[in-house]
Image (tube, rainbow, N blue to C red):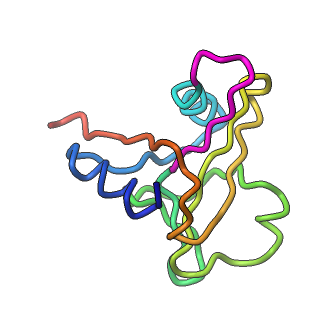
Amino acid sequence: MTCDYARKLCSNLSSTLTSIHSAKENIFIAGISLSNEYNATAYTAIGLIGEKNTWKWLDGTAYNFTNMYYWDDQIGTPKDGFCAYMRTQAQDIYLSTWFKHEVNFRGFKQAVCKMNANL
């Protein structure tokens, strides 16, 4: 699935791709992402996009936490059309590192959507 497809999937569920604002939330989302297999690796779309040379959460919340892979973070500012995904391995759920990729990248296997509690 691509970033755009993941975004549409969440939209069809009256939700948005998730935002993550702490290490605890990151681990929680990682836990949702994994299957029951010990050696599983999950590639999960999250709601972080590149816009006007900065990162932005699709739900409009502040970008106040990152778990971006250090090399991706050092390459420079995100280009428009970049999105982020979480890579989680069952044997080390605490890492659950984020990576950036072009929006048309088809490597995601799933997405985590976040619904408004007022619906």
Does the magenta-highlighted stretch encompass residue 1? no
Dividing the picture into quadrants, the one containing residue 54 is bottom right
Task: Name the residue: 31% across, 50% down.
Answer: 9
Q: Looking at the picture, how far across and down is residue 115, in whole percent?
A: 28, 39
Is residue 20 placed above or below 51 in the rendered structure? above
Task: Name the residue: 72% across, 17% down.
Answer: 38
- Direction from residue 32 to residue 30 in the image, left or right: right
- Direction from residue 14 to residue 71 in the image, left or right: right
Task: Name the residue: 60% across, 32% down.
Answer: 30
| Front position in the image: 34 or 50 | 34
Dividing the picture into quadrants, the one containing residue 69 is bottom right
Is residue 20 placed above or below 63 in the rendered structure? above
Q: Across the whole image, how many numbered discs are drawn on residues?
A: 0
Q: Looking at the picture, how far across and down is residue 79, in whole percent?
A: 60, 81
Q: Residue furthest left?
A: 119
- Direction from residue 53 to residue 73 in the image, left or right: right
Q: Looking at the picture, how far across and down is residue 11, in whole percent?
A: 25, 53
Quadrant location of the C terminus in the rendered image = top left
Task: Name the residue: 83% across, 58% down.
Answer: 70
Bounds of the magenta span?
Answer: 35-45
Q: Looking at the picture, how far across and down is residue 107, in whole percent?
A: 58, 54
- Direction from residue 95 to residue 20 in the image, left or right: left
Does the magenta-highlighted stretch encompass residue 39? yes
